Image (cartoon, rainbow, N blue to C red):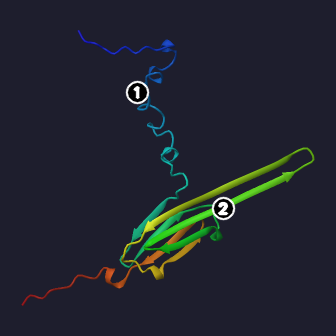
Amino acid sequence: MSLVKFKKRPFGDLVHQDFFDMDDFFDNRSWVRNMLPDTFWNGKTTEPALNIKETDDKFEIELAAPGFAKKDFNITIDDGCLNISAEKTKSEEEKEDDYTRKEFSYNAFERSLQLPKTVKEEAIKAKYNDGILKFDLLKKEEAKKKPPKVVEIA
């Protein structure tokens, strides 16, 4: 004979059994089943996606920031850290005889990247086009990959 935990269901089979089972509730909900994006729960809804590519002589960074204009960005380098932020507000008001419609939107983000010591901070270039903010971070000469040295055998 074996013992089995009894699960009492208040509405019988009318409602799926795990709806009222708190032990199983957090294991079976939609956020576990990937029905909601991860950004819904992890608080990163305002942090733009970032791609970083390293070549022999530079780093290339692409930051997805659609809907902004060049004037909306604030880019600084402070103590070896590249700080990127943007802020945009928009408001509309429409007045008619019997109603007034007001709309307001605000969009902002902040992203900071610790720069490697091999980057020439004074040579960082940024370009914004089609919603993508691109950076070229040139490497210092001593950090560039050098071809292997051939050693002659005597």
Q: Quadrant of the C terminus?
A: bottom left
In the displayed structure, 64 sits above or below 12; it is below
What is the residue that sits farthest to the left in this orientation?
A: 154
Q: Which is nearer the N-term, disc 2 or disc 1?
A: 1
Mark 2 secondary-structure assignment: strand
- Residue under the image location 49 percent in, 74 percent down: 77
Amino acid, disc 1: Asp
Mark 1 secondary-structure assignment: helix
What is the residue that sits farthest to the right in this orientation?
A: 97
Residue 21 percent coordinates (x, y): 43, 22
Say left or right for 54 vs 154: right
What is the residue that sits farthest to the front in this orientation?
A: 79
Say left or right for 68 vs 149: right
Residue 140 percent coordinates (x, y): 37, 82
Q: Quadrant of the N terminus?
A: top left
Amino acid, disc 2: Lys
Point out which mark residue 88 bears: 2
Q: Residues within 10 Å of mark 1 (few under 14, many from 20)?
A: few
Foreground residue among 101 and 52: 101
> Which residue is identified by label 1?
24
Residue 65 percent coordinates (x, y): 57, 62
